[in-house]
Amino acid sequence: MNSSDLDALAGRRVLIKPECLQRTGSFKFRGAWAALSGLPEQDRTRGVIAYSSGNHAQGVALAARMLGVPAVIVMPADAPALKLANTRALGAEVVTYDRTRENREEIGQTMARDRGLVLIKPYDDPRVIAGQASVGLEIAEDAARLGVATADVLVPCGGGGLTSGIALALEAHAPGLRVRPVEPVGFDDTGHSLVAGQVLRNAALTGSICDAILTPQPGDLTFPIMQRLCDPGLSVTDAQALQAMALAMLRLKIVVEPGGAVALAAALFQPDAITGDTVIVVASGGNTDPDMMARALTTLP
Amino acid sequence: MNSSDLDALAGRRVLIKPECLQRTGSFKFRGAWAALSGLPEQDRTRGVIAYSSGNHAQGVALAARMLGVPAVIVMPADAPALKLANTRALGAEVVTYDRTRENREEIGQTMARDRGLVLIKPYDDPRVIAGQASVGLEIAEDAARLGVATADVLVPCGGGGLTSGIALALEAHAPGLRVRPVEPVGFDDTGHSLVAGQVLRNAALTGSICDAILTPQPGDLTFPIMQRLCDPGLSVTDAQALQAMALAMLRLKIVVEPGGAVALAAALFQPDAITGDTVIVVASGGNTDPDMMARALTTLP
């Protein structure tokens, strides 16, 4: 989708891939479905476990319900209430933890071992990356139909599952479309890691409204893919993400969550960092509370 | 699109046709394109004129720009600022009038005569009705794919162009899908006219937030079609429309304007007036100001 008003603001054509309209309100259902639908029968019977700030949780919970697989989800206690409620409503058992004091990977691995569950990691899993890559296949198809052969493709980036998946798909199907990860300022571990040529961690674990993409560092599987295929990253402020959310509501008639709006924010507010007469933007999710939507709307003139 | 949360609230499956995602943010582009693209060359050169509370204005303005046709749009001075601004931004000449004291039909016909412009009426034009009917063709296709052979199809109804167009398409392609017009309480001229078997006017011309569908009475062309093909109408309060707007943002991640949300409101809040295990709902437009979005969000618990 697109809007001539956003094109004018960005100074180039902005093509949006609205994953907020995907099942469960974010792209995460794609990876979860790819991972769970490929499980052998005995694993499906025992069940799966996932840890997530919310969107992967909902994706796994829905895929599990559709496939008849029991699911346990480990979520931060301070995740948006909507994401916690949605995950429970999808029939998953939700276990909460303290994001600042506990390690979700350890909790997940311990529970997986104790209860014989298959751990579905949010990004460091080849099946999950393959599922997210389907976004890239669709972008390649849409771009070909529109005659767009070269463009920056801006992707909101947490652990890098979506970013690396899209990059792999475009490498094969539209090599002129170059993926660039977009992160919140201060949580731009992937951008810094790409510059340094090695995995770097963020100094902080909390402190941005972009909850969906606050991961400590790029993944072990995703970073080498991004290093090989991605162009330099971009970083946006929370204020820019909020304003992009508001403009998405006003101009595109879609609701995007803060972490899902960072790529649109980069396209709109950092046009000089982008090349070409067209930019492709992934709006990766839309699971946000009404208070955050109202807060975003106050940024409009 | 659909949401299991909305299904639960409505007590049946709710399938949404999101016309807020259409070009210019409402279904109106369809009718405008159908009318303008069929004009003979000499009419295209002189130009067109339209009167509209805003959505038809934007549809005509965009279709005119795409086809290189000059366009004059007559709009109420109290139309949402966003609709006025968008129409001007699309290159149309905007002429405003006082909704309570002046008659837009007279203004439009006078200007059309004086300046040799072709009047594109918002609903009482067979070409416009044919364009809106394409919504019905798509609903028929989607329903067939999902195996839905019988259902109420709830359509926000102003002058009846969309309602009668959809009804004609479904008569031919999915006769088990029965169209029911939905209007704001107090502006339910079509519902009352269907009961009475003759065209009745609303007592008031203003006083609802559902600006997109506040027409004084059903159209001369549209009413006989609706009388022949539609099931009884439904009426919702402004408060119900606002709450439906908020739930569309939260659950579907789409922005629907008040008048565009009345069909969803009927599905969610008047389930006993609807039959069948599936209901189809048209969300007809999304052009609303940030203040109205914020107001809608305050209705959520």
Image: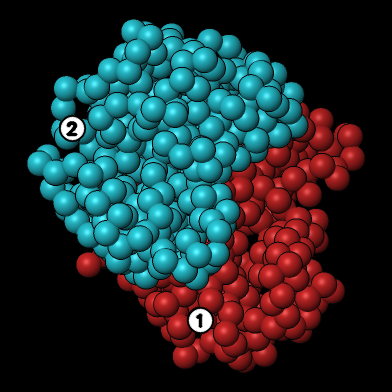
Chain colours: A red, B cyan
Label 2 neighbour load within 10 Å: few <14, some 14-19, many 20+: some
In which quadrant will I find the N terminus of chain A?
bottom right
Q: Where residue B128 appears, x then y in whole percent?
A: 49, 43
The one of A285 and B89 positioned closer to us in this rendering: B89
Residue B179 place in picture, x, y as percent: 52, 21
Q: Is residue B6 visible?
A: no
B233 lies left or right of B67:
left
Q: Position of residue A268 (x, y in %)?
A: 43, 76
Dot 2: element: loop
Residue on which disc 1 sits: A12
Type of amino acid under label 1: Arg
Q: Secondary structure at mark 1?
A: loop
The dot on residue B205 is 2
Which residue sits at x=35%, y=26%? Answer: B218
Is A84 on the left-hand or right-hand side of A15?
left
Q: Is residue A269 left or right of residue A112?
A: left
* Disc 2 residue type (three-letter): Leu
Task: Specify the quadrant that holds the C terminus of chain A.
Answer: bottom left
Among the 4 quarters of the image, the one containing residue B261: top left
Q: Quadrant of residue B276?
A: top right
Labels 2 and 1 positioned on one and the same chain: no
Q: Nearer the viewer, residue B26 or A83?
A: B26
Query: Image check: B51 left or right of A61?
Result: left
